[in-house]
Image: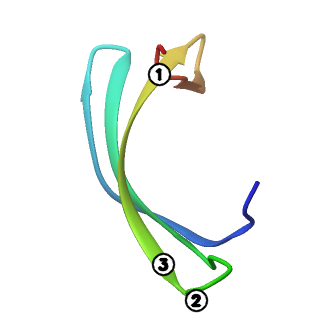
């Protein structure tokens, strides 16, 4: 596992209890520093709590 430097949420769009979250993760690779990777995640809201949904393999 690579420790990350920063995680930034850029955009959130929700429909009902399902949210699509666009973010950027910044980390240091062994050969490069400050690599930023854009990500799109699925989060759900259940009983007032927010949960990340792991992608299916």
Mark nearest the camera among 2 and 1 is 2
Viewed as shown, does residue 56 lie left or right of 1? left
Q: Position of residue 40 (x, y in %)?
A: 33, 43
| Residue carrying label 1 | 55
Q: Position of residue 55 (x, y in %)?
A: 47, 22
Q: Residue at x 28, y 14 (%)?
A: 16
- Are dots 2 and 1 in contact, CB under 8 Å? no
Viewed as shown, does residue 43 lie left or right of 51? left
- Are dots 3 and 2 in contact, CB under 8 Å? yes
Q: Residue furthest front?
A: 31
Q: Residue at x 61, y 85 (%)?
A: 31
Near-viewer residue (19 or 39): 39
Placement of 8 over or under 55, stated as above or below:
below
Assign a secondary structure to mark 1.
loop
Assign a secondary structure to mark 3.
strand
Question: How far apart in space, not on screen, are marks 3 and 1 (Cα)?
Answer: 22 Å
Viewed as shown, does residue 7 lie left or right of 24? right
| Residue carrying label 3 | 35
Near-viewer residue (40 or 9): 40
Assign a secondary structure to mark 2.
loop
Q: Position of residue 6 (x, y in %)?
A: 59, 73
Tell me where residue 52 sits by quadrant. top right
Q: Residue at x 48, y 15 (%)?
A: 57
N-terminal of the pair, mark 2 or mark 1, is 2
Placement of 8 over or under 40, stated as above or below:
below
Visual colour scheme: rainbow
Question: How far apart in space, not on screen, are marks 2 and 1 (Cα)?
Answer: 27 Å
| Residue carrying label 2 | 33
In which quadrant of the rendered image does the N terminus lie? bottom right
Q: Residue at x 55, y 86 (%)?
A: 32
Are there few (<14), some (14-19), or many (20+) residues within 10 Å of tag 2? few
Viewed as shown, does residue 55 lie left or right of 17? right
């Amino acid at each position: 596992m690579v420790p990350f430097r920063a995680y930034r949420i850029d955009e959130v769009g929700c429909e009902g209890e399902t949210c699509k979250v666009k973010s950027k993760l910044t980390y240091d690779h062994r050969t490069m520093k400050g690599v930023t990777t854009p990500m799109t995640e699925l989060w759900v809201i259940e009983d007032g709590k927010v949960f990340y949904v792991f992608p299916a393999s």
